[in-house]
Image: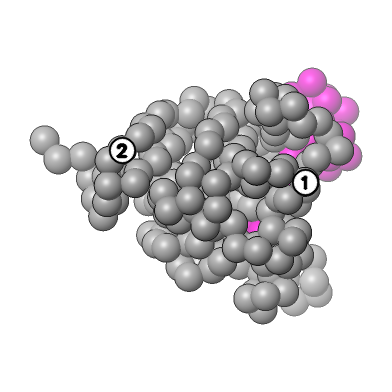
Amino acid sequence: MTDKALDGLSGPITLDQVVPARAPWDAIVRRGQTLRIVDLEGNQAVDFLMYALADDAERYSAQDTMAAQGNIFLKTGSVLLSNEGRAMATVTATSVAYHDTIGGACSCESNTLRYGHHTKSQHACVENFLQANARHGRGKRDMVSNINWFMNVPVEADGALGIVDGISAPGLFVDMRAEMDLVAIVSNCPQINNPCNGFNPTPVRMIIAG
């Protein structure tokens, strides 16, 4: 039986893993390889960071990426830049119309501020990022603004950000071609207080090909 999640990928599959709901994930992606993220059940936000493998002082820069493309959303053809202004990865394909760059990562502190003190103990993306980054010797000071794949964060007329129902669906994906050797860090978002995950975090699939 054909695995449709592999359609369009070229080269050998070097990694194929399912990341459980609410969990962190990290992997090395070599230059020229494609990292595909598959939204298995739909409406799942995937928080994402990148660091250069050769020197992790170089890492993804939301500011440089947005300024260079003149757009706050990521689409097919978007080039993800580092704080050195170099291309880290290119979005080569996506079956979702656009992805978020400005919504940030949920934390215990932001959950408490937005949703009440009863959420203080809830697991959040910042904790996932810290756990995954710790495996590479990085800590909280190494956190930067992240990408939110599949997340829908429209900017309202008054400039306020909305976090609304996602525009993804089961089986939709995003492909990134690595333009340098890099470390990809993921928090499969555990948020249950707003609709970014449909109030029900679900697994995603990570595939590296090439």
**Disc 1 packing (10 Å; few <14; some 14–19; many ≥20):** few
Under circle 2, the secondary element is strand
Three-letter code for the amino acid on which mark 2 is drawn: Ile
Residue 113 is a magenta residue:
yes
Q: Residue at 77% of width from left, 31% of height from top? A: 138
Distance of label 2 from label 1 (alpha carbons): 29 Å
Q: Which residue is mark 1?
A: 57
Under circle 1, the secondary element is loop
Q: Which residue is mark 2?
A: 13
Q: Residue at 48% of width from left, 61% of height from top? A: 91
Considering depth in this image, is 30 or 192 the residue closer to the camera?
30
**Disc 2 packing (10 Å; few <14; some 14–19; many ≥20):** some
Range of residues picked out in magenta: 100-123
| 2 or 1: tag closer to the N-terminus | 2
Considering depth in this image, is 194 or 173 the residue closer to the camera?
173
The percent coordinates of residue 69 (x first, y second) are 63, 76
